[in-house]
Image (cartoon, helix red, strand yellow):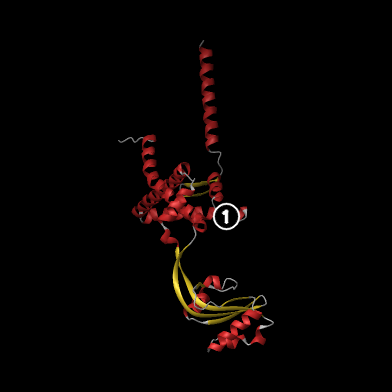
Amino acid sequence: MSKLKTYTIGKVVLWSSLLLFLFSCAENRDTKICKVGDQILYETELNDRISLLLGDFSDEEAKEKVIEEWINQQQVALEIEKSSPEVKTANEMRVQDELMQLNLFELENIFITENLDSIISNQEIQKYYNSHRENYKAESFIVRALYIKIPDTLAPMLNIDKHFLLKNDKDLKEIKKIANLYATNFYFEEERWIYFDDLVREISISTNKKEELVKSRGKAIFKENGETHYINVLDFRTKSISSPMEIERAGIRRHILKRRVNNLRNKAKETILENVKEKYPITYY
């Protein structure tokens, strides 16, 4: 029995030693890359850092860059710990707080994604538009003006440039006569108001140029696509107009969604903090 007992104990010791050896091998299986002080960079961490690296690098360039950054971090940490340990401690606490805020923000995003109702009805859009109609109003110019469009081949021969200045009553009569005979488009209701954008819809003209022409009650000639356009602004006013809801629909939908997201974010932080308190209880000593 004594030999059997001795053999059994020896077998247990052997298996225990083998398991300890295997556990130690598994623990140290990660390849060491480099070491600064007591800190060691392992291959697993290296690969994780490379995966987060931004930029277009070859595999070798990425590896060298990440290793150099890690070494710099460790060396600076050692130096600040030696030179000013209280500053190092304060910085670490600040980093921990910033990390907590970043993590909390990501948890809030998850909460919002899981709880956001992204369906917005036509009634909601209409209600928002009606409640914020003033936001969709813009100032537009209305003018009393003359406009005529003549083919380029005829314009030089008709002496329109001279008559369009309207220096006397005969000029207006002459322009109206030319318009009736040769114009491909014209507007001569000089006593009626018209939206300036409607008047010049056939002309490629910048917003700044429009404003300059209208406010100066000016005259202008534009040549486009084989046509010559003559404009003479006699007077102007501004008028507030509302943008149609259909044009604003996509923007209104974004506003409503943003408001829902903000409401959820205000609720998310409190909810998340309460949940983590329940999931991860505190032990005080």
Task: Measuring from the top left, give residue 93's x and y in whole percent.
Answer: 36, 50
User: Residue 54, percent across and down?
Assistant: 55, 55
**In x, y percent, where is residue 285?**
30, 35
Answer yes or no: is residue 257 visible.
no
Q: What amino acid does circle 1 point to?
A: Glu
Seen at 56% across and 47% down, the residue is 47
User: Against 65, is 142 above or below?
Assistant: below
Residue 48 in the image: above or below residue 233: above
Residue 207 versus residue 61: which sits nearer the camera?
Answer: 207
Residue 116, x across and y down, in percent: 46, 44
For this orientation, the residue located farthest to the left is 285
Q: Is residue 107 left or right of residue 164?
A: left
Q: Nearer the viewer, residue 255 or 2?
A: 255
Look at the picture and state if 208 lies above or below 80. Answer: below
The answer, for residue 206, to whether it is visible in the render is yes
Residue drawn at the location 56% of the way across and 85% of the way down: 172
Left or right of 156: which side holds 262?
A: left
Front-lying residue, 214 or 180 = 180
What residue is shown with label 1? 64
The residue at 52%/36% (across/down) is 27
User: Mark 1 falls on what kind of element?
Assistant: helix
Depth check: 261 or 107 in front? 261
